[in-house]
Amino acid sequence: MAEKVLITPKSFKNYKLKAHKLLHEHGYEIIENNYGRTMTEEEIIAAAQDNVVGIIIGVDPLPSHVLEQCKSLRAISKYGVGMDNIDLKRAEELGILVQNAVGTNSISVAEHAIALMFASARHIPAVASGVKAYGWERTIGFELTNKNAGVIGGGQIGKEVAKRAVGLGMKVTIYDPYFKDQAFLDTYNVKREESLEEVLRQSDILSLHLPATEDTKGLINAQTLSWMKPTAVLINTSRGELVDEAALYDALAHNKIAAAAQDVYSSEPPQQGDPLVALPNFILTPHIGAYTHEAVERMAIVSTENLLSMLSQKDDSQ
């Protein structure tokens, strides 16, 4: 029986020709996600029962009990960077190799974070909608130049955001307890702050670039929001779990901060009637940070190459 590869990301199909060719050349059959949405745990288990040795995974869930039922699985290739949807510890215990596509979407996500900063500062969604309704109401905004930008998380995306913010004339501070790249700070005139509270207190724009872990979930909550300026803007292009949405609703509704813009949410799409989504000073985009032609193509090719490399390693070790 031919060995198979399951591919779950919805956008993979847009650039699948080269990736599929690589897989076919190595003798693998391909199972695609034909649901038009993120696959459920049960759907992944069902698809992976039939001699699936590799998975190219998007944001679809791979907790321990799913991995345990994928009996033939030898390698998981992340289509993107964040791997918090994969139980990495259990994968290691089961001898399943895991790798992400480092650097493939950093520029696209960083540019989207900057776009959300401009959209919030100049109220672009609201005023554009007003004009489409044949109104001409103007809303005063603010410049990003000379504003303090706090970047929470100094990985590849955080660095790309910092570089672009410096280019806009912003004063940038990174908070990341594990950040050690002094050369980056010196080259781009970026500061590093060891106190999260201090970064939140001084930031006019706060941009989140962290994975969702036990330490980071709910990082932005009633307490941390209380440290922020009433004129501050929160940007989140990382994971919805980083933000306590009830606390954010309270902060926005009562003008404790000025605005927030996110590309991620606890429920994607949000539930009908969600009060936070309805607020005029809250912007939500449908998880499109990495959804550019360039990033999708890079992720498709790199995640495929990574999977083939891992499967080759497993074959050589057997």
Image: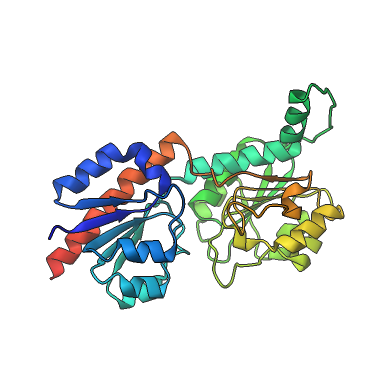
Q: Is residue 75 above or below residue 126?
A: below
Q: Is residue 168 above or below residue 58?
A: above
Is residue 240 found left or right of 255 in the rendered image?
left
Q: Nearer the viewer, residue 60 or 22?
A: 60
Residue 292 image point, x, y percent:
47, 37
Residue 171, percent from left and from top: 69, 45
Give the residue drawn at x 39%, y 75%.
65
Q: Is residue 230 left or right of residue 79?
A: right
In the rendered image, the quadrant that contains the C terminus is: bottom left
State whether residue 249 is above or below residue 288: below
Picture quadrant of residue 20: top left
Where residue 142 appears, x then y in whole percent?
79, 36
Q: Residue furthest right?
A: 254
At 46% from the left and 50% from the top, the residue drawn is 37
Q: Quadrant of the N terminus?
A: bottom left
For residue 198, say whether it is visible. Answer: no
| Residue at the farthest bottom position | 93
Is 250 situated left or right of 217 in this image? right
Seen at 60% across and 57% down, the residue is 267
Q: Is residue 281 visible?
A: yes
Check the image and tell me how it is coloured. rainbow
Between residue 20 and residue 119, name the one nearer to us.
Answer: 20
- Number of labels in the image equals 0
Residue 210 % position (x, y): 56, 59
Residue beneath the point at 31% across and 44% down: 301
